[in-house]
Image (cartoon, rainbow, N blue to C red):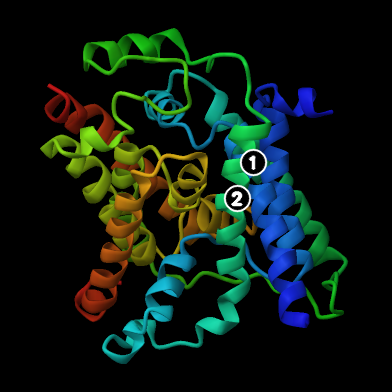
Amino acid sequence: MRAIFRAFKYSIIGILFGIIMTKSEAVSWYRIQEMFRFQSIFMYGIIGSAVVLGIIMVAIIKEYRLNDFYGRPIHLAEKDKRWKKYLIGGSIFGMGWALTGACPGPIFVLLGQGYTVMLITIAGALAGTTVYGLLRDWLPQ
Amino acid sequence: MISLLSKPWPWYVSGPAIAGIMAVLLFFGKSFGFSKNLSNICSMLGLGKQIPYFNFNWKKQLWNIWFLVGSIIGGYIAVHYLQSPDELKLSSATIADLQKLNIPFDGHLEPGAIFNWNYLHTGRGLFIFLGGGFLIGFGTRYAGGCTSGHAISGLSNLQLPSLIAVIGFFIGGLFTTHLLFPYIFK
């Protein structure tokens, strides 16, 4: 019963995410092109306003040591302090983002919108993930 | 209400709404990071037996898989029940640039000329969708996060590594858009 409730709860949050990503137009291939060509404030406004609000929320969580719904302190992950993997990995992802106009979330949102060709992109992403898993120990981190 | 939601959302509504998703997940003790799901699926498929990277208890990430399932349903709902009657208001400079690459602007979210199965049969289409997907999977796992994990969650927590990752996103995106696209689409 708890498992069903949990599935329901996170599905609902996911549904909201899918709707927000669609209505924000952040899933749009055209909008991503506009962003990488610096021809509109649109995508920068979305990411910028999300981050500004996020910074305020995180600061409040830390300042007041807020607990989550279950009464545990809200934990915010610290990213480990290396830089090569972020720069190289980030650049590789950026290429895929420009090509498909989608990041991992939007790939699935677009599938739901009826762009079934995204199944190929999902297959590609899983292949890329698998290859990373195989090569991980040989890559500069 | 429905008609109001159906209109295109201005960025200053969408951005805070995305931050709201992060807040709700934090409230339930989870962290917002979508690309983790790519590893979760590989782990679910049993790849953990051969590849140590996928050898973790994916059941602890089941919530994220449900989030993914929800995002697919959300995309469906948004286009079937909250469809905007208006054309996408893309900047005229972008429309002109894409025209030069023979990519027509059709007013939809995605260019219909590219996002279809016939296009996939061209080498170009396969490169964009399969190759692009590969780069997304490899890159996000290598960088340990994507737009949600680094650009939203990481920057909100003032993480320098996330800023480096976001700079990387733009290095790759700008390189592809300005240097590769003229070759890919000509």
- On the image, the x and y values in percent for residue A120 come to 29, 51
Element type where label 2 sits in the image: helix
Of B84 and B35, nearer the camera is: B84
- Residue for point 48% across, 16% down: B90
Total marks in image: 2
Where residue A108 sits in the image (x, y, percent)? 48, 51
Left or right: residue B142 versus residue B153 is left
Which residue in the structure is indicated by mark 2? B73
The quarter of the picture where residue B177 lies is top left
**Residue B183 or residue B127, whichever sits in front:** B127
Q: Are marks 2 and 1 in contact (CB under 8 Å)?
A: yes
Is residue A140 shown to the viewer in this render?
no
**At x 70% / y 56%, what residue is drawn?**
A13
Lateral position of residue A49 relative to residue B65, left or right: right
Q: Position of residue A129 (x, y in %)?
A: 31, 67
Residue type highlighted by circle 1: Ile
